[in-house]
Every structure is written in structure tokens, then in C-alpha cells.
Image (cartoon, coloured by chain):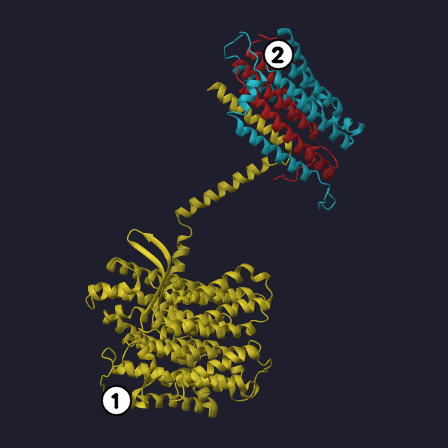
Amino acid sequence: MNAVFYIAAAVAAVSTIMVVSRSNAVYSLLYLIVSLLSVALIFFVLGAPFIAALEVIIYAGAIMVLFVFTIMMLNLGPQTAEQERKWLSGRAWAGPSILVAILMAEMLYVLWGGDHQVEGRHIVEPKEVSVALYGPYVMIVELSSMLLLGGLVAAYHLGRRVHGDGKEQQP
Amino acid sequence: MLQLLWTVPALPLLGFALLALFGRRLPRAGVSVIGAGSVGLSAVASGLVAWGYITQTVPAAYSQCLWTWMEVGSLKVDMILWLDPISLVMILVATGVGFLIHVYSTEYMRDDADYARFFAYMNLFVGAMVVLVLAGSLPMLYLGWEGVGLCSYLLIGFWYDNADNARAAVKAFLVTRIGDIGMLIGLFVLWFSLGTLDIQPLMERAQLQWTPNSAVAVAATALLLCGALGKSGQLPLQVWLPDAMAGPTPVSALIHAATMVAAGVYLLARTHVLFDLAPAVQCVVAVIGAATLLLAGTSALAQRDIKRALAYSTISQLGYMFLALGVGAWSAALFHFMTHAFFKALLFMAAGAVILAMHHEQDMFNMGGLRRRLPLVFWTFLAGAMSLAALPLVTAGFYSKDMILWSVLSSPKGGFLLWAAGVVGAFLTGLYSFRIVFLVFFGEEKGHASAKPGPAMMIPLVLLAVLALGAGFVEIPETLGRVALFSSFMGVHAAEASAVLGEGTQQVLAALLALGGLAAAVVLYLLRPGIVKAWVATPSGAALQRLCASGWGFDALYGMLIIRPVVALSSLCRDDFMAVVWRAVGICAEGAAAGLGRAQTGRLRFYMAGIALGAVVVLALVVLL
Amino acid sequence: MMATVPTEYGMVLAAVLFCTGLVGLLVRRNVLFMLMSTEIMLNAAGLAFVVAGSRWHEPDGQIMFMIIVTMAGAEVAVGLALIMRFYHLFKTLDTDAADTLKG
């Protein structure tokens, strides 16, 4: 099963790099879905089947659909892709890449300090997750519901049509 | 009936709250109804309370404890209302005259933009005064005391867009504050010495624990006197009162008649037991009163502004009250306070009607001949002036002033000199009050008067004119057939002491001098105005005139003795070492702000890079350390 | 079906994904791409949680991931609404156009 992990990891890394480097938003989005699916596979391999399902359903499913709708509504044409290509010059990459390379190096340094454990893994069943979720973590469930309600209200409010003079109108 | 006592302060305060919160949204008629109505209802309530008090089977002071204000250690201050004859008279005057002034204001302030603000302040003023008067403990009295101080500041500076008005308001506030500090320390001394601040226990303990003229008695009463001097505009803190004329005329009427300046007299009357234990301080009170009444009387003679002339006359009449307080005749002082409230409110409001008719002209030398234009105002003003001048037999002022003069002469604490000062003051009073009458209402017409006052202004004037003439009949001296409703109500009996002069003789003398003042005014200002003009033209006359017009130069004196040294000292301190330090702080902050402001580029990616850099640095610290 | 890769490898993958997302966030000027990069970073953080949870055989890591998903859902809804508003206002998706807060 180790091979599955390594292949999925490679796919995830490559597709993620493609996400940030494409100039067409739809391509980017497709690569992002690939990345999410491969991460879902990694979850499965790591013994978290429930989370793998959630990743596919919510992340790769629902959230990405939102992105697709937005891209459709914005109606970005080929000139936007052209614009993107112009923005993604080599110089634009240099500074952030160096900064993030340092960050990466630091993180690797920290990670290598630990013990290298290769013992057999253990599947954490959805039942265990649910018992913990509705046991000690029940308050977090409540907070999540509040968060989602807030997101709903905010999205509704921000999504209203705005006139040129900035006055709002009922949708 | 007596249970209604709490509504007397509550109603004006409620009116204030309503007007302060919703005044801008209310129509003018609504503001008038709330503003005048709350004080009117309060007056009705005090009338009912008075009826309840008089018809008690056993006359006794009534107290109503509302709640405990604070409790710290052994200090327990209750919000307690205390009704006895003194406070009853005071609330009747404060709410009754206050109501008439409010009614008058509905017309006087009709065209003002800040109509609601005006009535809010006025209601608060009356409310604070009633709290002061009904207070059963000194801290509560002090609350009302500061309340009227605040309101006088707000109302004197009511038209604050004129810098002079704002300055007059600040002056009134600061000068009375000097006295208030004294009073506050006085409260501390009383607490320290007697262990209570509730007024009635305080009086009882003082009588038991203090020996007359002991140091603590003198100190405490002298400090209380400081507060009273400031509030009541007596020497040497009288300078704020003439400048307080910057406010609208109804405010002057309210300050001078029903509230504010009466507070000092009330405080001394309320604590007269303490003052009886400190005869030395009482003597000072009497001397200050006598000096003030003469000084203010002469100053009133030289004023051109009708309101300033009336203001000095108030100071002078308050001098009479202090004179009476100084010889222990506090009931006479309160009687004079009551009649004074009637005729002084009347005079101010009539003056306001004149000023309004003359299009805000206040210089008396630009008026004249208004007798024919404003007949009703003339007759009411004349009634007030007669009462102020204490013309014998027919006016209220005569009976109250006579009571004071007789007390001064007959009391062992008084004496001939103090009495003589009072009698000379009576002459001056007659002279300056009729000077105003003749300058304003007689002679040729100079200005162009228009705008006859309406009923809302005239009805209070007529009512007050009746009171100014008739209110004296509740107390008629023995020589004229002895009616003693007021003093028996107060629970004091007129002194039966024999003096150098008999009561009748001194009455005749005082009355003659008052009439002499009137006669002199007739000669100098009506028949032969040339005499005064010629005399003022001479160098000595001009100098004296300037001196009197400036109120004996107290403003200049204080300017030289206090204000200039303080200003010089503070400008000296402006650039001291510490200032450099503070300025350095400012410069550093400015530089840092300029530097950090450059980081505010408005570009999202720049901020994000900042966050990433921060993460790198924090992680590096974690890794390396 | 169990893998026996060391925990560090999973963590390294999370770090790689996170850093890629960060680069995207810093490089892109189009606000839509920036939002996608944010999603990548959130997902990477979730991966780290799950890896850690599986290392100690605890469900806590997975619960944390669920919270991250919830948060990401709310964030995307608000973020996309903001993007729509942004586009209506500026007629572009360039974040550098919105620099009126410049100090």
C-alpha cells in the first residue's frame, strides 16, 4: 500500500503546482479537483475512510461546484487568460518562491527532528469519530452551526445586486 | 398629601430627561407643554404638600427616605427629603416663581433654534434647586448645589457661539467653584468633627459637642460660608453675577429670583444652628452683607445696561439677607428672600419684555418714554421697582426689609453701624431702582419700540406684580398692627429687645430714606438730568463713575492679583524640562506613524507577504532557539 | 488496506502542499486564484491533522479536519460573494486595483 501513498502524494504535489501556475481559471479548477481527490486517496490509505469520503463529497464536490458557478457568472473570456499570463512573469515568481523555500526548509528541519515510526497503522472508524464528535466535541458542532449560519447570512447580504451609485437593492 | 413630596423634585427632573432625550424630535408646542408643565405640576405638588403640612394635627417636620445613596464604612448617605417650614417656603418659591418664568419663556424664547435645549436646562435647574432645598443630608444638598452650578454654567453660556457668553459662563463656574471647594472642605470638617452628615442629627450633635466660638465651629462655619458667598454673589466672590447677564433674560430671572443665588442664603439659614455657635463668623457674615449691599448699591447707580443694573441690585439685596443672617435673624432673611424672589423675577421679566420690544437693546440710555408704548409692562415694572425700593406700607419689600433692619438694630449681634449701612443702602436702593424706571419709561422716546408682549409674558408679570405688592402682608410689624404669619410659621418669635431707637422711629427713618432715594431719583433723572451730566463731566465725577460702573474694580483687581500671576507662571512653566520629554514622545510617535504609514500600501499581496514573512521569522525563532 | 509510511512523509506532503498554496497566494493577482490557493492551504492543514491523528490512533485529527471543512465551506461562500461584489465594483479581478486603503 505504500506505493499508493507515494503515487498519490506525487499526483497531489504536481497537480497543486499546476493549480497555481495555470492562467486559465477552469484548468486551474480541474487541477485543484485532481489534487483534492488524490489527498482523499491519501486519507483512505492513512486509515481515515470517513474523512476521505468527506473530502470527495464536500471539498471536491460542493465547494468546487461553487467555484464553477462563480467562474461561469463572471464570464471570464480569453483576454483574461492573456492578462493572467502577462502577470505570471518570471520576476513575479522570484520573491515569493524564495520566501516559501525558506519556510519549507524550516518545516522540513522541524519534521526531521522527530522519531521515524513505521509501525502498522490502525483504521479510525467513522463510529469512533462520531462518538468523539458528539461527546467531548459537541460544543464545536454547535459553533460550526453558528459559523455556517454566519456564512449564509454574509453570503446572502454580499450577493445582492449593487447599483452604480452603491445603493443596495432587494434581490 | 405629604407623600407627594418626592414628586416635587422628580417632575422637573423627568421633564429634563424627556426634553434631553426626545427634545429635538418634539414639536415646539410639545416642548412648551413638557417644559412648563413639569414645573407647573411640581408647583401644584408643592402646593398640595404645603396644604398637607399646614393641616397636620401636630405640626412636625416631615421626612421621606427614598433610597440609600452610598454606604462606605460608617458613612451612610441617604437620599432623604426633609420638609420643614424653611424648605417648604423655598420649594414654593422655587417651583411657583420657576413656573411663571417657564411660562414667560415659552414666548420669550419662541424664535430660538435651541428651544428644547433651553427648556431641558431650565427644568434641570429647577429640579436641582428643589433637590438642594429638600435635601436631608449635606451630601445630597451638595449634589443639588453642584447641579444648580452646572445649570447656571449651561444657561449663562446658552448662546455659546458668542465667545463673550462662553467666557461669562466659565467665569461664573470658576468663581462659584472657589466657594464650593471651601464648602466641600467644610463638609469634611463636619464629618470629621461630628461623625454624621445628616442635617438634623448634625445640628443636635453640634449643640451638644461644640463650645461656642471653638476652633472647629469657626473653621466649619467659615468654610460653609465660603460656599454660600460664591453661590450668592457676596464679597469677595460677587464678580460672576453681573457677567451672568450674558444668558437669556428668563435665565437671569431664574438665577436671581428662585434658584442659584438663593442657595447660599438657604444654606446659612439651614445651618443657622451651627452659625449660632460661631458668633465670630456670624459677625463676618453681617459685615460682608453690609459691605456688599453698599458696594453693589453704588455700582448699580452707574450701570448703563438694564440687566447689569438689576444684577447689582440683586447682589445688594442678597447683602441684606446676609446682614440678617449675620445677626441671627434667619427668618427675616428668608422673608426677604421670598419677597425678593417675587419682585426680582418681575423686574427681570419686565426688563426682558422691554429688551425684546427694543430689539435686544439693553442700554438704558438708548431707551426712554416706553411708558406710553408698553403701558402694562411699565405698571408691572413700577410695582417691582417700588417693592425693590421698599416704599412704605404698600409694598412687600418694605415689610421684609423693615424686618431685617429692625432685627439688625435690636439684635445683640447687630448694632448701630450695621443698621446705618442698611439704611444708607435703602436710600441707594430707592435711587437706583427709580433711576432705571425714569431712564427706561420716562423722558423722550429714543428707540423704536415694537412687538407688544403677548399673554404668555404678561400674565406672569401681572401675577408677580400682585405678589410683589401684596406678599408682605403676611408679616406686619407691631407698630402697624402686628401680623406674624411668616415668623410664627417659621417657629421664631420676634425679639422684644429694646434698642437705641424704637421700632417705630427706625421704621420712619428707613421709610424716609427710601422715599428720599425716590425723591433724589425724581430730581436727578426726571426733572434736572443736567446735574448728573455736569457732575460726570468733571474729572473726579468721571473717575467715580468709572469706578462704580466697573463694580469697584474687582475684576481689574483680580486680574492683576490672581489671573496675571497665574498666567505668567504657567507661561513660564510651558517650556520646562518635562515639556521637552512630552514633546519628544509626540515627535517619536509622529515619526513612527509616518514610517508605518508607508507600509500601508493598500495592496493585498503585500500584506500577505508580510504575514508569510512573519511566519518564517516565528518558525525560525522556534527552530533556532 | 494499510500503509506503513512514516508519519514524517505525510507531514512533508502537507508542508509541500501548504507551501505551494502559499506561493500561489503570493504570486497571483487574480483574486479567484488567490481563493483557490487558500483552499489548497486549508486542505494541507487538514491533511496534517489527519496524519497526526492516524499517528496516535485518535479520532481528534479527523474531527479537526471536519471543522476545517466547515470553515472552508463558510469561507468560500463569503469569499465568492465578495469576489462577485469586487468584480461589479472594479470590473476586474485584479486585487491591486483595490488599493484605496493606501496610507
Mark 1 is surrounded, within 10 Å at the Cα level, by few (under 14), some (14 to 19) or many (20 or more) other residues, namely some
Q: Is residue A30 left or right of residue B402?
A: right
x and y percent of residue B54 in the render? 36, 75
- Of circles 2 and 1, the one toward us is 2
Residue at the disc numbered 1: B502
Q: Residue at (66%, 12%) from the top-left corner?
A: A8
| Cα distance between the residues tagged 2 and 1 | 122 Å
Q: Nearer the viewer, residue B142 or B604?
A: B142
Q: Residue at (65%, 14%) from the top-left corner?
A: A41
Say which chain is red.
C
Q: Nearer the viewer, residue B173 or A122?
A: A122
Residue at the disc numbered 2: A45
Q: Residue at (52%, 83%) from the top-left corner?
A: B377
Residue C97 occupies quadrant: top right
Say which chain is cyan.
A
Residue B548 occupies quadrant: bottom left
Q: Amino acid at mark 2?
A: Val
Query: Which chain is home to disc 2?
Result: A
Q: Residue at (38%, 62%) from the top-left corner?
A: B177
